[in-house]
């Protein structure tokens, strides 16, 4: 199973960006999918997550600005980021707990990371 993230880049403060992450490989179903971010010298932190049933969780610092969604038919998770701030600059990683068969509980996978830079 591989996760391929895309959509990073340079954006001005106040702007928007949409990240996508596609899971591929032997996939029976995907439990929770999410986005994390990391800046130099800091631990990776949760930005947002969404369960297979659509329940969403957000970090306090992105509530009202970011929206997570998923397309189960495409094994894809999205992160719509609005009202971006310079402090949102980070490498964003997607994460998914993938079941490879009906007998498999799930294994956690990470994407390669995509850099989002917000200029002031």
Image (cartoon, grey):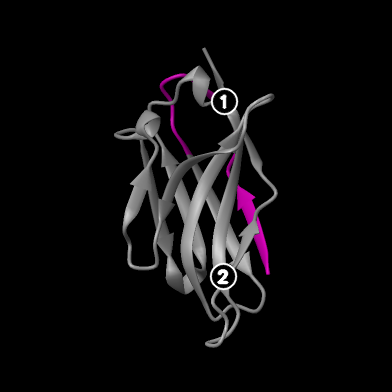
Label 1 sits on residue: 89
> Image height check: is 35 above or below 44?
below
Label 1, residues with CA under 10 Å away: few <14, some 14-19, many ≥20: some
Residue at point 57%, 85% (across, down): 101
Report x, y in % for residue 55.
Answer: 31, 58
Query: CA separation, marks 2 and 1?
Result: 28 Å
Report x, y in % for residue 94.
Answer: 57, 51
Residue at point 32%, 35% (across, down): 63
Image quarter where the N terminus lies is bottom right
Image: magenta residue range: 1-17
Report x, y in % for residue 8.
Answer: 60, 38
Direction top: furthest residue: 120
Residue 98: image tag: 2
> Image height check: is 61 above or below 98?
above
Q: Secondary structure at mark 2?
A: strand
The answer to whether residue 86 is left or right of residue 82 is: right
Q: Is residue 10 magenta?
A: yes
The answer to whether residue 86 is left or right of residue 107 is: left
Label 2, residues with CA under 10 Å away: few <14, some 14-19, many ≥20: many
Q: Nearer the viewer, residue 67 or 47?
A: 47
**Residue 39: quarter of image:** top right
Q: Nearer the viewer, mark 2 or mark 1?
A: 2
Q: Is residue 118 magenta?
A: no
The answer to whether residue 74 is left or right of residue 59 is: right
Q: Secondary structure at mark 1?
A: loop
> Image height check: is 104 above or below 47?
below
Q: Along the polypeptide, which appears first: circle 2 or circle 1?
A: 1
Determine contact: label 2, label 1, CB under 8 Å: no
The answer to whether residue 30 is left or right of residue 23 is: left
Residue at point 65%, 56% (across, down): 4
Report x, y in % for residue 109.
Answer: 64, 60
């Amino acid at each position: 199973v591989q996760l391929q993230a895309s959509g990073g880049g340079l954006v001005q403060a106040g702007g928007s960006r949409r990240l996508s992450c596609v899971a591929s490989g032997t996939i029976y179903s995907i439990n929770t999918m999410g986005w994390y971010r990391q800046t130099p010298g800091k631990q990776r932190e949760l930005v947002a997550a969404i369960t297979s049933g659509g329940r969403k969780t957000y970090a306090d610092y992105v509530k009202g600005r970011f929206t997570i969604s998923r397309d189960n038919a495409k094994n894809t998770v999205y992160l719509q980021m609005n009202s971006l701030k310079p402090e949102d600059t980070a490498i964003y990683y997607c994460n998914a707990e993938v079941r490879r068969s009906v007998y498999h509980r799930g294994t956690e996978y990470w994407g390669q990371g995509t850099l989002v830079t917000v200029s002031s």
